[in-house]
Amino acid sequence: MGPDSLEYQKSIALEFSANKNRIRHLIGSVHWGEDGRHKEVILMNFLKRFLPNNVAVGTGFIKEGDSISTQIDIIIYNPSVPLYFKENDFIIVQPGSVLGVIEVKSNPDKYKIGEAIRKANKVGPLIREKRIFNGLFIFGQNGNNEDYSSEMLGEPQNGMFKNSLLEALPIDNGVNHIVSMDGVFIKKWNKEKQFSCYRIRDLAVSYFFSNLLDFINSSTELLGITESMYEHLYPIPEGKENFIMWRLRKPAPETE
């Protein structure tokens, strides 16, 4: 049996599900819906193993003069750039060191997803000199109560979710990647100025992280990703466009 990048990438989602289930078995389902530090820790620990040693991960704030972000669940940054403050994983960083940010949610409805997108969009104006990865990671929950993400598969209707995505389209470094652990992956395409939603099931989580590596690689010289590595990161032979569910563009202005 030879190497199998497709199955390897699928195993990343299985790893997250296993950790999620272990914690849920210990604390029960009553507290699982709460946005808690334990979910951020699961994701942060994975990123520390997944990312190269010249990239660091923490939680905290981005500061530029008197402008300070709200607290960000996960900040991916270049540790060679001086920090304002660091105590274990808590950091206050300069915008120039930031490579990516991720907000973490449990099982929000579409309104709360929209709120999280709007919060993530506010990071954009602080990072002006380069592109960064700006992601939303939704853990979800076991059982049959996962309406929040099955609704995401339908074309966005008027409301907080659609409006927040439309607001993100013109914002440099606004939210550009969203994943739900039940298989929904949403990506912002800057050139086409659109969001695309894909149902790639057990590859959604790995594609979220592959895009993170891709973003860091394209905006810095910290990584070296070869063509064979790209094939490993994106193992769907026919490409994910065959799994498209919807696209969202800013409406064209009405003409008289």
Image: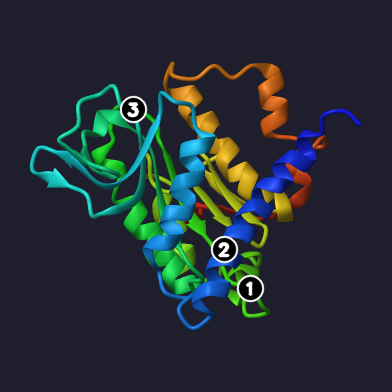
**Marks 2 & 3, CB-CB < 8 Å contact:** no
Whole-angstrom CA distance, mark 3 to mark 1, is 35 Å
Q: Is residue 15 visible?
A: yes
**Marks 2 & 1, CB-CB < 8 Å contact:** yes
Q: Is residue 159 visible?
A: no
Residue that carries the numbered disc 1 in the rendered image? 142
- Total number of numbered discs in the rendering: 3
The crowd level at tag 3 (other Cα within 10 Å; few <14, some 14-19, many 20+) is many
Residue at the extreme right of the image, as rendered: 1
Residue at the extreme bottom of the image, as rendered: 30
Horizontally, is 212 left or right of 54 in the view?
Answer: right
Q: How is the image coloured?
A: rainbow
Look at the numbered disc 1 and give the secondary structure of its residue.
loop
Residue 27 locus on image (x, y percent)? 49, 76
- Nearer to me, 106 or 237: 106
Residue 202 locus on image (x, y percent)? 72, 53
The crowd level at tag 1 (other Cα within 10 Å; few <14, some 14-19, many 20+) is some
Residue 65 locus on image (x, y percent)? 9, 37
Look at the numbered disc 3 and give the secondary structure of its residue.
loop
Instruction: Give the quarter of the image for residue 160.
Output: bottom left
The numbered mark at residue 78 is 3
- Nearer to me, 152 or 211: 211
Residue at 88% x, 28% y is: 2
Whichever of callouts 2 and 3 sits on the residue coming sooner in the sequence is 2
Whole-angstrom CA distance, mark 2 to mark 1, is 9 Å
Residue at 79% x, 46% y is: 242
Residue that carries the numbered disc 2 in the rendered image? 20
Which amino acid, by three-letter code, is at mark 2?
Answer: Lys
Which amino acid, by three-letter code, is at mark 3?
Answer: Asn
Which amino acid, by three-letter code, is at mark 1?
Answer: Asn
